[in-house]
Image (cartoon, rainbow, N blue to C red):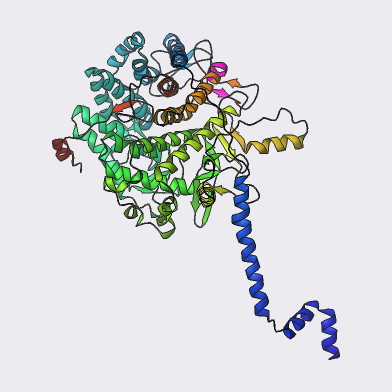
Amino acid sequence: MTILGDILRSNPAAKISTSLHRKGISIRHVAFALAFSISLWTIYYNYLRRSDELQLFPEEVFYYPPETPEVWSDRALQVKNAFLHAYHGYERYAFPRDELRPLTNESIDNFNGWGVTAVDSLDTMLLMGLQEEYKRALPMVQQSNFSLPQNLDVPFFETTIRYLGGLLSAYALTNDDTLRAKADVLGTLLSPVFNTTSGFPRFSVDTFSDYGGSHNSVGVLAEIASFQLEYAYLGKVTGKKEHVDHATAATRAFAKADLSLSGGMYPTRWDINIGVPVNLHMSTGALADSGHEYTLKQYLLTAKTDKANLEMYIRATTHIINNLLFISPQRQLLYVTDIMTWKDDVRISHQFEHLACFFPGLLALGVHTLPLDRLDTLGINVTDLFKDLPVKHRKAYEELAHFNLADLHLWAAQGIAQTCYLTYADQPTGLGPETVQMRSGGPFGEIPWMEAMQVWRKRGRKGSPPGVGDKRQWAGDHNATTAKERDIAANSRDYGVRNQDYYLRPEAVESFYILWRITGDVRWRHRGWAVFEAIERVAKTPSGYASVNKVNTLKPKLQDSMPSYFLAETLKYLYLLFTDEDPVPLDKWVFNTEAHPFPVFEWSASEKAAYGIP
Ligand code: DMJ
């Protein structure tokens, strides 16, 4: 007893245990109580406090004046004048070379030297009613035989979306047969890239080896998947089976691929010989973007008959909404990012790229053109779409099914597009950086959008869904005098700028344009106007417009580059955003990824039979 007494004196745990034992409470009871308390704490910590966190930033409501039709038509005119300024500078200093260098007034041939700015701009001129410029450009296009000096690579993707897309779209708007003939020549010249067993194209036509395709066996999703629109339409207008076959071979190869590990979504890199993905990197930004864009658009272009592509679109958007969408901790900025899975390790980058700003426009286009809540009316059984995936991915659609799918897609589109806008509005230049690094979570870790959405739903759907309501632009750090204050100010923005450049890209205004057309909500016009004013203020040079470095500072620097897509896409979408006329309605025309509109068409019964189209 003395020994036991000593132990009890020196070991309080044993003392407690003996005393509990006397009261009939065993170790098992204690363990159970402990486990119970831990569970309660976990529920509180993970769910209830998270819910509180999500309530911290109620939406603000701003007033967007409708403005008179005259105001908007004057703004459309100002965009047209911007186009004329850029194109005249190109004509004067760079035509017929590829692009203008807007600081030195020199030219650069970076896309085969066939006058890419002129070809890429043809349909913008037509839509803006610029007949004089169009007439001046046409002879060069008609005379081009797309010849190349030896030992050069013709990059397939860029050549297809800019040149082939430009020619086909100008043909669609004019019915000028010389353009169709040129498109046919170019489509055929590029066709050695399809010499692969999978049907996916190689990176380039390689004139080193007598016009064989490049020998790289790994292809990037955006580059191997963004040509079906161009080749399907080229096949339609020329009646040539070989063009159509190139488009359908890619669709078949994608439909056959095993996507069980990637949740039914296309990863970013593929072995183009055997047609299988070679990584588990999921993204809507660089490497991937238009690969996703073309699933929905190929379905729409072919008058909603290409079901395989539609199914792919539903699978991919479901996966993206569940896994790639997050909201930032303070401002609740909704963003789309990329995920890399390696063995059991899942890395979410929380980078948000300007390139990914096309994605809200794509979602909005889907809302406008698809019966998202009645997919069965299109003969799609949603359960079947996911049935071959592992359980965690199979449940993905159920997660979204608590909501009306069209609402959910539109909210995602509005929230992400607003974040795109804020990445412009937050900068002293008013121009958006190429990449920002989002803060990925506060004390409670990162916040997947769907998790926030479920909290919002369970709490009675009060106010706007998380990430969707209006948000103020960042207050800046002008008032911060100490390092600590600067840190606090930087944190309150919720992201850091990773790449400070604005390359005159279109994706944000492209999405504003589609959102404006399908919702009629004037805020998208206002946001587009703010972007245009910033371009005018910061990027304009005496001969054109220049890409901008250091957009997040008061002293931005101009770069000697004016990409052709600035005229083909950025200015076209801005013009279409402000003009009340709708020369290319979204249910009759489909824009390729370089903003070249093609008319929706149907395959006739004989074409279907000849080309093996189901
Ligand atoms: C364009 O050439 C196309 O939109 C392409 O799909 C992505 N990048 C540029 C514009 O940013």
Judge from the rendering whether residue 368 lies leftward or rightward of residue 178; answer left or right. Answer: right
Residue 249 placed where, x, y %? 26, 42
Could you tell me if residue 9 is visible in this image? yes
| Residue at the spot 70% in from the left edge and 84% down from the top edge | 24
Residue 48 placed where, x, y %? 61, 55
Q: Most extreme residue toward the bottom, as rendered?
A: 1
Image: 571 above or below 386? above
Image: 166 above or below 279? above
Could you tell me if residue 193 is visible in this image? no
Q: Most extreme residue toward the left, as rendered?
A: 606
Region in magenta: 535-549
Q: Nearer the viewer, residue 390 or 202?
A: 390
| Residue at the spot 41% in from the left edge and 30% down from the top edge | 514
Write down the quadrant of residue 194 in the picture: top left
- Which quarter of the image is occupied by the C terminus? top left
Write down the quadrant of residue 186 in the picture: top left
**Does the magenta-highlighted stretch encompass residue 160?**
no
Judge from the rendering whether residue 576 lies leftward or rightward of residue 375; answer left or right. Answer: right
Judge from the rendering whether residue 159 lies leftward or rightward of residue 341; answer left or right. Answer: left
Ligand 1 is found in the corner quadrant, namely top left
